[in-house]
Amino acid sequence: MKKVFKMQDLDCANCAAKMERAIGKIDGVKSVSVSFMTQRLSVEAEESRFDEIVREIVKVCSRVEPDCRILI
């Protein structure tokens, strides 16, 4: 399953790159793209575990940049 989420308060391209690397390491994630310019997160992951994976993505993003929110 592939889905695109809007992000809020993603402050720098470096943080976006860190998030992208960290999300890519989550078990079940097939592909990920975090765009600082468009403030969007695109993720493709196992459909059967998608909600669980999204919760893990939210945790990872808040560790990299605490003020950033993913609008689900």
Image (cartoon, rainbow, N blue to C red):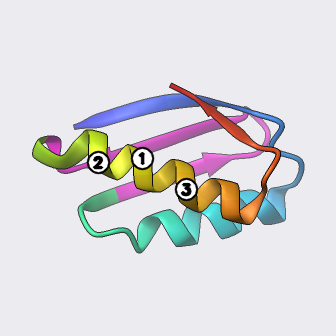
Horizontal side of 15 relative to 34 (left or right) equals right
The range drawn in magenta is: 31-47
- Residue occupying the point 56% across, 71% down: 21
Q: CA distance from mark 3 to mark 2?
A: 11 Å
Residue placed under numbered mark 1 in the picture: 55
Question: The N terminus appears in which quarter of the rendering?
Answer: top left
Is the residue under label 1 in contact with that under label 2 (CB below 8 Å)?
A: yes
| Residue 24 vertical position relative to residue 71 in the rendered view, above or below | below
Q: CA distance from mark 3 to mark 1?
A: 7 Å
Is the residue under label 2 in contact with that under label 3 (CB below 8 Å)?
A: no
Secondary structure beneath disc 2? helix
Q: Quadrant of residue 54?
A: top left
- Which circle marks residue 52 in the picture? 2
Q: Position of residue 59 (x, y in %)?
A: 55, 56
Q: Amino acid at mark 3?
A: Lys
Q: Position of residue 42 (x, y in %)?
A: 48, 40
- Residue occupying the point 43% across, 56% down: 56
Q: Amino acid at mark 2?
A: Glu
Q: Main secondary structure of the magenta part?
A: strand
Secondary structure beneath disc 1? helix
Horizontal side of 7 relative to 53 (left or right) equals right
In primary-sequence order, the first of circles 3 and 2 is 2
Is the residue under label 1 in contact with that under label 3 (CB below 8 Å)?
A: yes
Q: Nearer the viewer, residue 66 or 4?
A: 66
Q: Nearer the viewer, residue 24 or 72?
A: 72
Residue placed under numbered mark 3 in the picture: 59
